[in-house]
Image: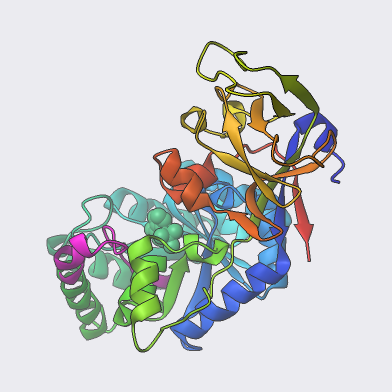
């Protein structure tokens, strides 16, 4: 039992063996010529940056990507000195000096940041490690095709202070076949960008475009580096991606090669006998149809256990599934343990993960709660203790 469990009511376990397996599988999929970058935005997809980074390092990862400078700063406090970091999105120009000092790379997607990167590098005498982002059809951030000649020209004139680490882009939803045509268009646009840089004689260390779904669906998007987010944590980006890989003759499998790294656990804090006709919890959403035993668990929507799971979710106790009954409260859920006579106060409860023969997956959970894996994971509170298990 983790040290803080008494105050927080639940905790998250991170499995070292699951992560090792995922990283090994995902690394093989991209080959030795492509660099594995672990995306740890959104508090490492809810896994907890401070615990996840050293764990992933122990599994061999040496490059991480965050969304913003605040996350990069947290990763910096726990990472090995030789581990690389890049910021894919938000950094104020005022923080570029700090990033430079820490050896952190950053995306450049407008002329203001490009000029600020050059200026800070000149002022400090250290090369700025930049990734030039190309806008290829996502319509989020990046330089558009007509701007690229000016970008190349500015970079060329300042190569004495720039370390051109990457030229990159991001796809608009490679996890869905519905976006197939759009992804093809983006690939073609990025291919032209790539050729332009090479023709102009400026080759970055890495051309990169793929996240999990692109790498696992369109092998030719892998290039020199893959920014793996969701898949490293043991989740397919979508059911479509999983089925495509399961059935494709090059990648087919019967046993899922990805294993969920995270298990969310709590404990039964009380049990109650309820008589026929009595309501359970707030309001009248659940009335006992027969004499029941219920268990009380100190987790609620405050902790990311969605209210939509009221009268719908399940947890695992003593290797059995126990349905959530009544409304999910802010800090409490109640579950039916009538069919689990050995269940008692103090028993371990699995909210997400495996216990005995049963499993509660984030995807089943998030389908019920009508949200996607990503959102469900990221809602797991920052302050829940993370415990590394073998
Ligand atoms: C720029 C960028 N690269 C990579 C990723 C990782 O994506 P995924 O979690 O689907 O692997 C993200 C996340 O959305 C992203 O924004």
Q: Please report the residue visible at 58 percent of the width from the left and 41 percent of the height from the top.
A: 314
* Residue 207 can be seen, yes or no: no
Q: Is residue 56 left or right of residue 128?
A: right
Q: Give the farthest residue toward the top.
A: 283
* Most foreground residue, 181 or 9: 9
Q: Please report the residue visible at 14 percent of the width from the left and 68 percent of the height from the top.
A: 185
What is the total number of numbered labels drawn onto the structure image?
0
Whole-percent x, y for residue 278 in the image: 62, 13
Name the quadrant containing residue 55: bottom right
Name the quadrant containing residue 349: top right
Instruction: Work out whether 121 lies above or below 25.
Output: above
Point out the quarter of the image occupied by ligand 1: bottom left
Q: Which residues are magenta?
A: 164-184
Whole-percent x, y for residue 101 in the image: 61, 57
Is residue 180 within the magenta segment?
A: yes
* Most foreground residue, 168 or 113: 168
Q: Where is the C terminus found, in terms of image quarters?
A: bottom right
Q: Please report the residue visible at 66 percent of the width from the left and 76 percent of the height from the top.
A: 60
Q: Please report the residue visible at 63 percent of the width from the left and 56 percent of the height from the top.
A: 358
Q: Is residue 359 left or right of residue 201?
A: right
Instruction: Work out whether 104 lies above or below 69.
Output: below
Name the quadrant containing residue 171: bottom left
Whole-percent x, y for residue 203 in the image: 34, 81
Is residue 232 within the magenta segment?
A: no
* Most foreground residue, 207 or 314: 314
- The colour scheme applied to this rendered structure is rainbow
Q: Is residue 85 left or right of residue 30?
A: right
* Residue 301 can be seen, yes or no: yes
Q: Is residue 282 left or right of residue 118?
A: right
Instruction: Work out whether 220 lies above or below 10.
Output: below
Whole-percent x, y for residue 318 in the image: 76, 48
């Amino acid at each position: 039992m983790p040290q803080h469990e008494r105050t927080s009511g639940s905790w998250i376990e991170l499995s070292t063996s699951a992560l090792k397996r995922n990283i090994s599988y995902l690394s093989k999929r991209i080959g030795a010529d492509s660099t594995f970058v672990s995306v740890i935005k959104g508090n490492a997809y809810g896994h907890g940056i401070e615990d996840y980074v050293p764990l992933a390092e122990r599994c061999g990862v040496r490059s991480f990507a965050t969304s913003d400078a605040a996350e990069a700063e947290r990763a910096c406090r726990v990472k090995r000195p030789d581990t690389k970091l890049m910021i894919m999105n938000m950094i104020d120009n005022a923080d570029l000096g700090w990033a430079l000092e820490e050896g952190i790379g950053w995306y450049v997607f407008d002329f203001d940041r490009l000029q600020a990167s050059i200026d800070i590098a000149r002022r400090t005498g250290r090369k700025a490690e930049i990734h030039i982002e190309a806008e290829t059809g996502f319509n989020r951030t990046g330089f558009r095709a007509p701007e690229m000649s000016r970008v190349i020209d500015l970079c060329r004139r300042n190569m004495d202070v720039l370390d051109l680490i990457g030229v990159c882009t991001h796809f608009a939803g490679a996890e869905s076949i519905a976006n197939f045509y759009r992804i093809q268009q983006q690939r073609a646009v990025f291919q032209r960008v790539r050729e332009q840089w090479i023709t102009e004689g400026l080759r970055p260390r890495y051309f990169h475009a793929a996240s999990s779904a692109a790498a696992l669906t369109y092998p030719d998007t892998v290039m020199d580096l893959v920014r793996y987010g969701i898949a490293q944590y043991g989740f397919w980006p979508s059911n479509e991606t999983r089925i495509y890989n399961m059935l494709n003759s090059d990648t087919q499998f019967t046993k899922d090669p990805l294993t969920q790294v995270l298990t969310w656990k709590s404990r039964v804090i009380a049990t109650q006998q309820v008589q026929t006709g009595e309501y359970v919890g707030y309001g009248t959403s659940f009335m006992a149809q027969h004499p029941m035993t219920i268990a009380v668990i100190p987790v609620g929507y405050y902790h990311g256990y969605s209210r939509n799971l009221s009268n719908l979710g399940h947890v695992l106790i003593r290797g059995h599934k126990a349905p959530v009954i009544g409304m999910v409260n802010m800090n409490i859920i109640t579950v039916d343990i009538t069919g689990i006579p050995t269940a008692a106060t103090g028993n371990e409860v699995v909210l997400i993960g495996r216990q005995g023969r049963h499993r509660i997956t984030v995807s089943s959970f998030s389908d019920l709660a009508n949200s996607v894996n990503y959102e469900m994971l990221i809602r797991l509170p920052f302050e829940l203790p993370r415990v590394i298990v073998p």
